[in-house]
Amino acid sequence: MESKKKILIVEDHRLFREGLKAMLSPGPEYEIIGEAEDGLEAIRMIRKLKPDLVLLNLSMPRVDGFAVMRDIKREMPDVKILVLSIHESDQYVLQAFKFKADGYAIKDSTREELRAAIRCVLEGKMYISPGVAGDVLACYLEGRKALAGKSVLDAVTQREKEVLKLLAEGYQNREIADMLCISVKTVEKHRSNLMTKQDLHNSASLALFAFEHGLVTTRT
């Protein structure tokens, strides 16, 4: 008898995690082997548990879903990642696939849609929710990236976004350095680069910039 596929849930809202577990368990084809409530915990658990599939939220405390995908796909490319997000814009969808997501589903998907998405991704196929910008995936695969548009964030590197997000959430340089496994001097350098690129002059303006561009969902 073929063993069940192992699924890890990464979601910062407890009620939504509980809802996912209720929707998917018990299942004849897969089992929930764990759950994480932020990106750092997710990376540790994926490395330890080696799931077949990760159900991944994008907007989370400390380290976001994009950073999780970047690190995990680099180390464990066979782990499948199905993004579960409230974001329906082209920008988020294209960015997720740029970071090698295997599928993108919207959080208000039905039980049947979610199960179909999981089966699709576990079979090695790419999945995108039918109601989300129907031509986005086709355009991405054809290499036409015009839909992504230009943004003030284009000049900001992924690591700078991670530092900015943590700064906006109120973490100090030393805490950020420990979370991202970099030196305090490197954190300070990223902070200085951000302020120069975006013409920002203090911590408050950095936090406001992060909030206005969706890197954090609530102001600290």
Image (spheres, rainbow, N blue to C red):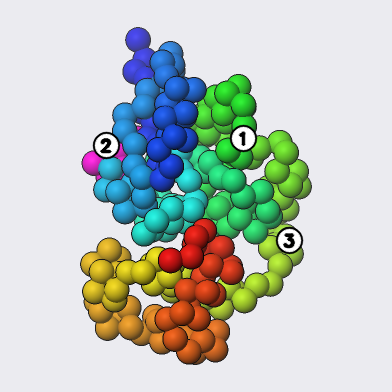
Q: Is residue 112 left or right of residue 51?
A: right
Q: Residue furthest top?
A: 1
Q: Amino acid at mark 2?
A: Leu
Q: Residue 176 appears at what percent x and percent y?
A: 30, 69
Cα separation between marks 3 and 1: 24 Å
What numbered label is drawn on residue 108?
1
Callout 3: SS: helix
Give the mark, 1 or 2, whose residue is nearer the N terminus: 2
Res. 92 visible in picture:
yes
Nearest to the observer: residue 40 or residue 170? 170
Q: Residue 89 appears at what percent x and percent y?
A: 68, 53
Q: Identify the magenta region.
A: 46-51
State whether residue 143 is above or below residue 41. Answer: below
Nearest to the observer: residue 210 or residue 10? 210
Q: Which residue is tagged 3?
A: 147
Kindly identify the residue that appears in the image at 39 percent across and 56 percent down. Answer: 61
Give the mark, 2 or 3, whose residue is nearer the N terminus: 2
What numbered label is drawn on residue 49?
2
User: In the rendered view of the protein, which quadrant contains the N terminus?
Assistant: top left
Q: Is residue 186 magenta?
A: no
Kindly identify the residue that appears in the image at 34 percent across and 42 percent down. Answer: 36
Kindly identify the residue that appears in the image at 62 percent across and 26 percent down. Answer: 110
Q: Amino acid at mark 1?
A: Asp
